Image: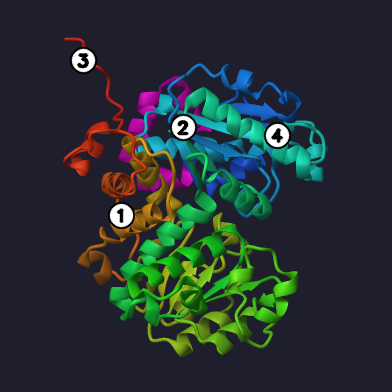
Amino acid sequence: MAMMELEERNERLFYKLLIDNVEELLPVVYTPTVGEACQKYGSIFRRPQGLYISLKEKGKILEVLRNWPERAIQVIVVTDGERILGLGDLGCQGMGIPVGKLALYTALGGVRPSACLPITIDVGTNNEQLLNDEFYIGLRQKRATGKEYYEFLHEFMTAVKQNYGEKVLIQFEDFANHNAFELLAKYGTTHLVFNDDIQGTASVVLAGLVASLKLLGGSLADHTFLFLGAGEAGTGIAELIALEISKQTKAPLEETRKKIWLVDSKGLIVSSRKGSLQHFKKPWAHEHEPVNNLLDAVKAIKPTVLIGTSGVGKTFTKEVVEAMASLNERPLILALSNPTSQSECTAEEAYTWTEGRAIFASGSPFDPVELNGKCFMPGQANNAYIFPGLGFGLVISGAIRVHDDMLLAASEALAGQVTQEHYDKGIFLRFPIRKISAHIAANVAAKAYELGLATRLPRPADLVKYAESCMYTPNYRSYR
């Protein structure tokens, strides 16, 4: 609350403080604190920080957008609040997520604060506790679904493009799985859209995997991946890994997917379950006998990499982690679920149960771990390493669409920032984010120009210097 009050009083000072103290304040303005803020949003609400568009405004969305005082919007982060982090349906109290994300677009990516617009689409909530809460600020009705929901979202997407043009980046944030995939597929060919839960998470994890190969040995194609969680994050990461392996080996995508296995709430996803699977899980249904739980899946698949995107805490049990350690000299364990309370295991558990042999990273931060006289520094596979630079690259190039190759370009740029010092400490993702965002932005912009999707012409000769020159800095103007 103190940080948000500071932002309202003195925006420049807020961003100066955040930029200079990123490691300390990132957990405050982003995960895990933002999750708790969303849960209590109605109780701590003072004044709106973004734009709320309610179902009651159907037919008037363009008019509502025009009420926002800033006209030159470059980045919009929008949520409908149905799947906030691992906390479920928080309705319009999910506004804390777009606000927090856009603060990072500015502090870490360099997008001007005035060019950022946080939006919450309020179509109701199925959270009974919120519906009965006297302080809930949203519509007190069950969620709109089906035709009513999609018509409302279509009006929103049309109005955004009409009001802000084709080059405004629309980032979908914390939509439920079924809607997230549908919206990304529907508008990916007509708008500049990006889903951080699907694509951003995938990019940062792929960067971590590529960087970790120096510790693990071999290439991506030499490893076997097992996921706990087959939603937006899990399937998004899996697809980008498969794309990268396909790019490296020239093997068909259908073939490279077979290196990747997913476990959902019903067990290992296998071909015998295809008839009952959601469409986004079907590409991962491989030939194998049914396996009912994660521990048995680890023993059967023998993965070298274990990735958690389940949103359920404490699911990487001692038995699961020890099984990974028995199969691998250096097991790679990524407990990516947010906030910290939902992490599949803690850093201390991963290091202790593997006797310090694990390479570990999480979605939310963990403190260093002392074990047998050695200090282990957990990595953080946080989307904040990717999405600010990726979005800024799209903005400075004037891109009109997001292409999978841009996600790979962002991953390559991030992986390229890992130094020998990181390897010596056994970590692969933990460094100053703002410094690398210019490199990520330059790589993404270069790919946009290469694909013919950039509109800002002529192309700058040095994209890294150009990105750095475009970055917002919270300085006061000198009048003398």
User: Is 369 included in the stretch rendered in magenta?
Assistant: no
Foreground residue, 290 or 89? 290
Asked if disc 4 and disc 3 are in contact, CB closer than 8 Å, the reply is no
Q: Which residue is mark 1?
A: 431
Q: Which residue is mark 4?
A: 152
Dividing the picture into quadrants, the one containing residue 343 is: bottom right
Which one is earlier in the sequence, the residue at label 3 or at label 2? 2
- Label 4 to label 3, Cα distance in Å? 46 Å
Q: Are marks 1 and 2 in contact (CB under 8 Å)?
A: no
Q: Which span is picked out in magenta?
A: 1-28
Mark 1 to mark 4 CA distance (whole Å) = 41 Å
Element type at mark 1: loop
Q: Which residue is mark 3?
A: 478
Residue at the image position 69 percent from the left and 43 percent from the top: 90
Classify 343 as above or below 359: above
Q: Is residue 149 above or below residue 198?
A: above
- Amino acid type, label 1: Phe
Callout 4 amino acid: Phe
Name the residue that disc number 2 marks: 166
Amino acid type at circle 3 is: Ser
Identified at 40% across, 71% down, the residue is: 246
**Mark 2 or mark 4: whose residue is earlier in sequence:** 4
Q: x%, y% of residue 154?
A: 65, 36
Label 1 CA crowd tier, 10 Å (few <14, some 14–19, many 20+): some
- Secondary structure beneath disc 3? loop
Mark 1 and mark 2 lie on one chain; the one further toward the N terminus is 2
Expressed as whole percent of the image width and height from the top left, the position of residue 226 reads: 53, 76
Residue 302 visible in the picture: yes
